[in-house]
Image: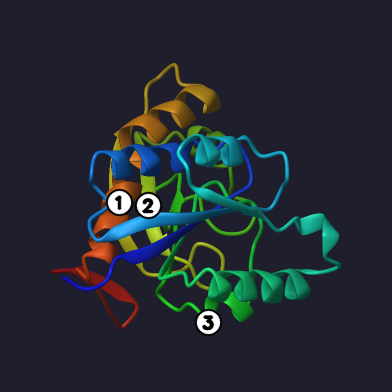
Amino acid sequence: MSNTKNIVVLVSGGGTNLQALIDAQNKGELGNGKITCVISSKDDAYALTRAENNGIKTRTLVRKEYSDISSYSCAMRDLLLEEKADLIVYAGFMTILDENVCNAFQYKMINVHPALIPSFCGKGYYGLHVHEEALKKGVKVSGATVHFVTAECDAGPIILQKAVEVMNDDTPETLQKRIMEQAEWKILPKAVQLFCDDRIIVENHKTYIK
């Protein structure tokens, strides 16, 4: 068994995906990984409280204190290096980081997106917008995707996907809730476990689970 991998989780809000990771960790389901730090882009994010309640170190790197994406990304990169991050997980992290971070941690950053990529993804597709667009299109299934983060929004290699049925009477809110409960909170911890147990291989922009 190699050394335990340090998982750093990036958050901006309530932290429901962080909670799913904490719950998985408490059940011993993160494989050879341990959440060692939670970093928030907002100093009042409830996710920080969730981390503190579970004895996890927290730090804040407030986006609005930086003039542009580049300076913020460089500060985040330095912070992640300082925290010796082996895996970085976006859990409702609403700030786009540029190649300064993505190149320093290639194939070590993962995000969960609330749709089946390549549908309803890319710039502008976040939060309820994703579900509004899915319902507007009349799709019968939606779901969630865990993928590696690259400098291009939602374009990194896909690790896991899970489909969720869309109901006739769904609103963006009910669909969002179902996708979180049935897909996001299941496949995000699973992808973390696979990464921490060295079971993900990336070749030609595709992943293979061994």
Q: Look at label 1 and name its amino acid.
A: Gln
Marks 1 and 2, how far apart at CA? 4 Å
Which residue is at 56% across, 65% downward? 153
Marks 3 and 2, how far apart at CA? 23 Å
Query: Tag on residue 19?
Result: none
Q: Position of residue 13 (x, y in %)?
A: 62, 40
Query: Tag on residue 161?
Result: 1
Q: Are marks 1 and 3 in contact (CB under 8 Å)?
A: no
Q: Position of residue 132 (x, y in %)?
A: 57, 34
> Which badge, 1 or 2, comes first in the chain's sequence?
2
Q: Which residue is mark 2?
A: 145
Q: Look at label 2 and name its amino acid.
A: Thr
State the SS at label 1. strand
Q: Nearer the viewer, residue 106 or 87?
A: 87
Q: Is residue 42 left or right of residue 142?
A: right
> Which badge, 1 or 3, comes first in the chain's sequence?
3
Query: Tag on residue 104?
Result: 3
Q: Look at label 3 and name its amino acid.
A: Ala
Q: Nearer the viewer, residue 94 or 19?
A: 19
